[in-house]
Amino acid sequence: MIAPILGLICGVLIGVASKVVIPYGYSGYVAVAILACLDSVLGGIYAILQKQFDLKIFATGFFCNGILAVGLVWLGNQLDINLSIAAIVVFGSRIFNNFSQIRRFLLKKSQKQIIVVTEKEE
Amino acid sequence: MRKNHYLFALTLICILLGMIIGIQYNTVKKQNSLTENQRLTELTATLKKVQEEKEALQARLEEKEKIIKDYENGLNFGATVENLQSEIGQLRAFAGLTEVRGAGVRVTMNDSSIKKGGDSNAYLVHAEDLLAVMNELNVAGAEAVSINGQRIVGKSSVSCAGSIVMVNGERVAAPFEVLAVGDGDILQSALKFPGGVVDNLAPWGIEITIKKEAEVVVPPFIQTVLYKVPVLEQEVDQ
């Protein structure tokens, strides 16, 4: 479970070190895409814990959510509505949901282990 | 074994996500420094302007002090009278008691010729509309304004009186002609800017034309004002 986190940190370091800068005007899209991708990754972690992980669903979800979010914001810009708020709210709440599910799952798992141990001791 | 496979995919995607986040971090950082730079130039310009203003005020202060000295000394009687006379002239011009000629704009406003139903009052030029035009002109730096020959001064009033409008207590009726002396281009654009006075009146079909002219003649304020109630403040002795 540590590998993805290490990967994330490595990625951030590579990104910062690369000195690549997104052209002005596109950073809003990238911000929303980041949210969508973060949501997908947390969803993926949850699925792995539930042993329901499907690589195809995960990979397509990662890219399609990102593209959809960016597309939505672009459409909003064309129609002069701030649709990025919709994307931020939806993905933000999903991130919180996924995270709380992961947390619960991990807590339950550790509780079970304790129970198993105590049972054995008895 | 299978789980490791998934973890590998997840790690790869995490690296990708991390890279995007890193790049975005770079971008946001750079943009912030850009806006800071903009703010810096803005502040520099403001500082320069304020300094110039200060110098101008300083020069004016010195000038006034010199005049006061002249008065106090009383040595140069002719110069004192001259000073007073020029001051009277300035004050008269400032109070709107003199005719003003110069480049400016001529704004004509007439009641709407279309009557599309609804409240017929909405299609007339109201005192409020005249006030709005007058106010915009003053905001844009008009040096003298008149409405149908009535000079607008500090004591002026523009009020609604049924189908006509009272300006300075005199009845005036449509078509209204507002004259303003000042920078024609600025005055014109002050009225015509999007969402401005002209735009607000346009839906009602009120005919408003703005013409820039090389010379407009704004008449003086002709009524006499008798001050009875207030005790006129004496000028403070220096």
Image: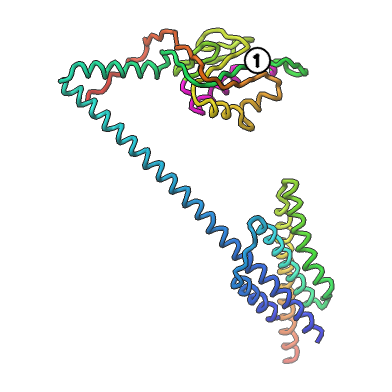
Q: Main SS of the magenta segment? A: helix
Apparent side of residue B180 relative to residue A48 in the rendered image (left or right): left
> Quadrant of the rendered structure where residue B57 is?
top left
At horizontal 24% and vertical 25% (from top left) the residue drawn is B67
Q: Position of residue B29 (x, y in %)?
A: 56, 62
> What segment is highlighted magenta in the picture?
B122-143
Q: Residue lying furthest bottom in this view?
A: A121
User: Of B44 and B19, which appears nearest the observer?
Assistant: B44
Taking the magenta stretch, the answer to whether it contains residue A91 is no
Provide the chain ID for the residue under circle 1: B
Eyeballing the image, is B48 above or below A31? above
Picture quarter with the N terminus of chain B:
bottom right
Q: Which residue is mark 1?
A: B110
User: Of B140 and A46, which appears nearest the observer?
Assistant: B140
- The local secondary structure at tag 1 comes to strand
The three-letter amino acid code for the residue at tag 1 is: Asn
Q: Position of residue A90 (x, y in %)?
A: 74, 58
At horizontal 56% and vertical 7% (from top left) the residue drawn is B171
Apparent side of residue B68 relative to residue A65 in the rendered image (left or right): left
At horizontal 31% and vertical 18% (from top left) the residue drawn is B86
Q: Position of residue A113 (x, y in %)?
A: 73, 84
Eyeballing the image, is A33 above or below A2? above
Picture quarter with the C terminus of chain B:
top left
